[in-house]
Image (cartoon, rainbow, N blue to C red):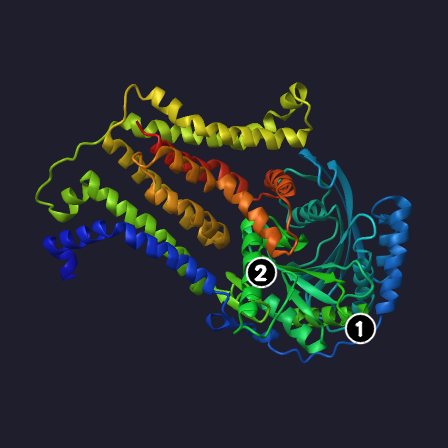
Amino acid sequence: MGLLSDPNRRRALTKLLTRLNAPICVMCYLAGVAWFMGLAFEPFTLRTYMSENAMGSTMVEERFPAGERALATGREFAAHKKKVGGMPVDWLVKTMQSRGLEVFTQSFTRKLPFPDENKERYMVRGTNVYGILRAPRAPRTEALVLSAPCSEGNNNNQAVGLLLGLAQYFRSQIHWAKDIIFLVNEHDLIGMQAWLEGYHHTNTTGGDWSPLQGRGGSIQAALSLELSSDVITSLDLVLEGLNGQLPNLDLANLFYAFCQKIGVLCTIQGKLQRNDWDTTSGYSHAAQTMMLMVLKQASGRPWGDHGLFLRYHIEAASIRGINSFRQYKTDTTTIGRLLEGMYRKLNNLLERLHQSYFFYLMPSLSRFVSIGYYMPAFGLLAVILLLQVLNLLVYVGIIDSFLLSPSVLHQPSSPGVLSILTPVVISHMTGVALYTLPILSQEMAVQHFPVSETEAVVLTAIAIYTAGLALPHNTHRLLQGEGTEEGWRVLKLVALLYLAVLLGCTALINFSLGFILALSLVPIAAFITPHTPKALSAAIMVLLSPGCTLLYCVFVFQELQETPVSLQDGWMLFLSVISQGILDHALYGSLVYPLLALLIYPCWLLLWNILFWK
């Protein structure tokens, strides 16, 4: 307290921080990166454990016997699907009714803002079929969901067969205290979104769907099953949901516990767990797994049908069967026993899963990194922005006037409001154009250029993004004269505070996205000035811009998945990622695209204005 109350000591501390500002910022950046990379080292992580007492033991006797019958049902489903050229609604209704379920259907229609060339669809029409097994031992106020998407071709037929087999087996059990809903949804996420909105009587995305005729209790947990082979080598757990949301860690712990009990190989991010954590290859494997999770979470898109449940505070995950060249094989009966065990433990819940973590990273299924361990990595990067703010406050005289010597109340000279307000307004108007014009102008672009609607949307977004580079000239044309030396300092002060708030709020909601943006934006925000070499600084700023950061993430993601791509293929993937980001926002409410277009990009443009300040 004496240090803060004594003006001389405050002045000395401020001068010290100002003089050592650059070295401290460099050390904080390197320390933040090192801290993040150290999170994958096993001694720095925590071992997973079950926090929910109702699921603390796996002493459940799983007896599901009908794996072969489930495969036969899956083949029958595939035959009817091929016969009708889509979802065999009538066959599914009759089959579920024969298994003693209350069966209902829901039709839906959705027109996309522009064609989805990846899945070749524009006007989507489909039907969801679901059956409800009523709880015989409870007042039916709670429910669990098991879903399997009806995919195109021969994909996921085995999952639908196993779902119907489990429905028949569960019907013969009397210990269920929750309704169990067996859902087969068409058109993957679009069908799941329609069903969830109908179930909860909401319509947040503008879809057209028929109201649900039958409902169960409040959904406590859900699993989405994806199987496309009669036998598998491992089960992969998918956790990442919409806008980077994750289910309660106990759901992942439950899956891992039953995999260990039954003897099923389990993976996360498609990678098996290794025990040689003290070797270079073992650490590299854990780091790759964690970075894959970071990139998937940062994308903000749901990586499975489970991802849409999370916005309704329903703990959900997807389980995918992988059939690789490993010698170890697991049959459908074993998978059914695993799912039976998980649902019997979820059936014991007295309240929603809440005792374990909701914010975490997983370098393996047996280890996790909690929010208290990974947030300091972001904090070290955020400190750089605060140090630069302190440095600018000293330069413009605010610290001297109001903190160091309050008795001397001289007013420092300040730049005109117009010189600061103009670049802020123009930058955000460019962000609004980047957010709205790609979709609004697609018809005009198709009429005047030989491109498809999807190409028109993506190329318009890239054109507006690139046009922002000309903003310094347009801005200074409106300023009616040259800017002052203090003008760019005040503008940078505004940009630094703006960026600090943006990144801080983003990291609290989606740490991975906030950290990746901080890695690229903090260095240029800290050290950009009008006095640095223009050509070199401009090249660095472009290379660290949000668009280029997205391009790097595409290549890094492919490398981590061990599927490297050429420059041309990587560029095509980059264009596909842009179109999918815009579609995810329009269809499901993903916030990544509006965040980048309306907030992050304008903030980067403010820094670009500072570089070319006259």
Residue 206: which quarter of the image?
Answer: top right
Residue visible at 39% across and 29% down in the picture: 425
The C terminus lies in quadrant: top left
Mark 2 residue crowding within 10 angstroms, few (<14) / some (14–19) / many (20+): many
In front of the other: 201 or 28: 28
Query: What is the CA distance from the residue labelled 2 to the residue labelled 1?
Result: 27 Å
In the image, 70: left or right of 353?
A: right
The mark tally for this picture is 2
| Residue 161 can be seen, yes or no | yes
* Secondary-structure class at tag 2: loop
Q: Which residue is mark 2?
A: 247
In the image, 500: left or right of 560?
A: left
Res. 561 mark: none
Amino acid at dot 1: Phe
- Vertical arrangement, residue 280 with respect to residue 468, above or below: below
Q: Position of residue 371 (x, y in %)?
A: 46, 62
Contact, CB < 8 Å: mark 2 with mark 1?
Answer: no
In front of the other: 10 or 591: 10
Q: Position of residue 217 (x, y in %)?
A: 67, 59
Residue visible at 52% across and 28% down in the picture: 464
Q: Position of residue 340 (x, y in %)?
A: 74, 70
Res. 64 mark: 1
- Vertical arrangement, residue 359 with respect to residue 265, above or below: above
Mark 1 residue crowding within 10 angstroms, few (<14) / some (14–19) / many (20+): many
Amino acid at dot 2: Pro
In front of the other: 146 or 591: 591
